[in-house]
Amino acid sequence: MNIKDIAQKAGVSLSTVSRVINSSGYVKEETKELVLKAMQDLNYKRTNSSGKASKKSNRIGVIIPDITNPFFSGVLKGVYKVAVREKLNIILCDTNENINKEIGALEMLKEQSIKGLIITPTTDRNEFNRKYLEQMDSMGVPIILLDRDLMYSHFDAVYVDNIKGSYEAVEALIHEGHRKIAVIAGPLTTKPGRDRVSGYEKALLMNNIPADEKYMFYGDFRLESGYNLTKKVMAMKDPPTAIFVCNNMMTMGCLKALKELNVRIPEDIAIIGFDDIDFINLIDLQISVVDRPTAQMGELAMDMLIDRIYNDKSPGNGEGVVKEVILPTNLIKRGSERLIAKDR
């Protein structure tokens, strides 16, 4: 016998039963009485399998979509810095940008009595991951969104100003004299994917340059998509003079494709990427980037989570105000944005 049986007998939802069992969140008094009576009738005895975050637990769940991405490596440095300070252990899950793996990670963490969760969702359009998170929240597990949003959610979050960062990158290309600027964007099912395209389009609009669909290419934030889309860009009959690439992994794929095609930067084409890439700097390949404070994002997310854990107030239950931190980006110009191919 489990909470599903109680919910069925009381005629309420699973989350309502969880809130009553765990004394987490608001439940109408008459509804609470129905649940308690159902528990009594069914002779329900609460055990540790309820999934509520144990006060004695020192485990924090962290779910990221791509552990090979240097951005998330930087974020994790900040997360671990605070974890060490607070004597917390991290359970790290990599979803590989796969929603099914994300659901599996959430199921696993729900059984681990974690104290809290930091997550970068694979997509913000999937009902299943949102429902899982809301269920964990109702069981007393504070949740912080990192970098990506979740539609119709009520969780605290740490983001960067993607629109302004992208705007400044594209404007820098325009000021160099570029008019045909391609964008290799991320998926529009994510906040960074949408916002960076918005910044690209805003910069063109503010400079009276029409946004041409033929120069807009959509990837998945993975190296392979940056590589394949760059090949398509360079095969155009009327290719652009510049490319704005919307994340570091796609930038690496773009650079790989340009190298194979013997295309010089910036002599043949200019490029600005989103997120700095340490190893490119080590080999002295001067690529201009929109940089962001990755470690600070991780630290802030952990600090917000610690605050929720010890204040024991969830914004989803009407007991706290949703906190949203938006950090600034920094455009680093290293010369790859220049317009040299003036005959184009």
Image (tube, helix red, strand yellow):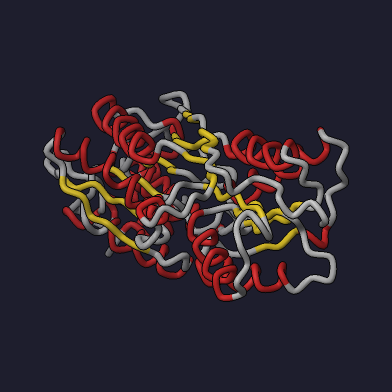
Q: Residue 100, position in %: x, y?
A: 45, 70
Tell me if residue 21 comes above or below residue 343 in the rendering: above
Report whether residue 28 is seen.
no
Q: Position of residue 3 (x, y in %)?
A: 33, 57
For residue 270, above or below residue 301: below
Which residue occupies the foreground of this view, 147 or 219?
219
In the image, taking residue 340 as reference, residue 248 lies left or right, namely: left
Horizontal side of residue 155 vs 123, given as left or right: left
Front residue of this view, candidates 344 and 111: 344
Residue 74, given in percent of the width and then of the height, sits at: 33, 46
Q: In which quarter of the image is the C terminus?
A: bottom right
- Picture quadrant of residue 203: top right
Q: In this view, does 208 lie above or below 194?
A: above
Residue shown at the point (64%, 43%) measured from the top left:
195
Q: How many numbered tags mark residues here?
A: 0
Q: Where is residue 73 in the image (x, y as percent from the top left)?
A: 32, 52
What residue is at 76 percent from the left and 44 percent from the top?
201
Q: Residue at x 77, y 58 (%)?
A: 240
Quarter of the picture holding the N terminus: bottom left
Is there any visible trace of residue 93 in the rendered image?
yes
